[in-house]
Image: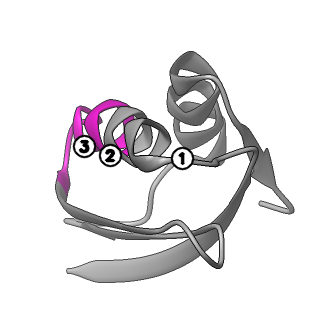
C-alpha cells in the first residue's frame, strides 16, 4: 500500500469534501481517501503509486484543482 498526500485548491465546505472523496475514491486501486478541509490536503491510500493525470482528472471532475503534483 502507498499513502500520498496532495494539496487541493478551492474546497470550502462539507460538500466539497464529499465530492473530492467520491471522485478520488472511484479511481481503480484507491482504498482510502481522507480530506482535511482546513488544510486543503487530501491523503490517498492505494495499492500502488497513482498516475498524476488520473488523479488530476478526478479532482477536476469534482470541481477543484490539484496543486503541485
Q: Nearer the viewer, residue 43 or 4?
A: 43
Queried whether the magenta region covers residue 28, the answer comes back as: yes
Rendered-image quadrant of the C terminus = bottom right
Mark nearer the N terminus (3 vs 1)? 3
Which residues lie in the magenta part? 21-30
Q: Nearer the viewer, mark 2 or mark 1?
A: 2
Place of residue 61 in the rendered image (x, y in percent of width and height, measured from the top left)? 55, 17
Disc 2 crowd, CA 10 A, few/some/many (<14, 14-19, 20+): many
Point out residue 49 in the picture as x, y percentages from the top left corner: 43, 65
Residue at the (65%, 67%) spot, across then down:
40
- Measured Cα–Cα span from mark 2 to mark 1: 17 Å
Q: Is residue 10 left or right of residue 11?
A: right
- Residue 46, image x, y percentages: 25, 65
**Vertical side of 17 occupied by 19: above or below:** above
Count neighbours of disc 3 (C-alpha within 10 A) and say few if under 14, some if 14 to 19, many if 20 or more: many
Q: Are marks 3 and 1 in contact (CB under 8 Å)?
A: no
Residue beneath disc 2: 21
Return the residue found at the far right. Answer: 68
Secondary-structure class at tag 1: loop
Circles 3 and 2: CB atoms closer than 8 Å: yes
Answer whether labels 2 and 1 touch (C-beta < 8 Å): no
Residue at mark 1: 51
Q: Name the element at disc 3.
A: helix
Q: Which residue is mark 3?
A: 25
Q: Which residue shows up at 45% across the image and 55% down it?
A: 50
Q: Nearer the viewer, residue 24 or 54?
A: 24
Where is residue 45? Give x, y as percent.
Answer: 27, 71
Secondary element type, mark 2: helix
Tell me which numbered mark, 2 or 1, is placed earlier along the sequence: 2
Amino acid at each position: 500500500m502507498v499513502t500520498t498526500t496532495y494539496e487541493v485548491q478551492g474546497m470550502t465546505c462539507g460538500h466539497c469534501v464529499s465530492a473530492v472523496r467520491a471522485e478520488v475514491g472511484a479511481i481503480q486501486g484507491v482504498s482510502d481517501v481522507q480530506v482535511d478541509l482546513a488544510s486543503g490536503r487530501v491523503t490517498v491510500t492505494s495499492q500502488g503509486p497513482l498516475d498524476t493525470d488520473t488523479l488530476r482528472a478526478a479532482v477536476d471532475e469534482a470541481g477543484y484543482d490539484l496543486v503541485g503534483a
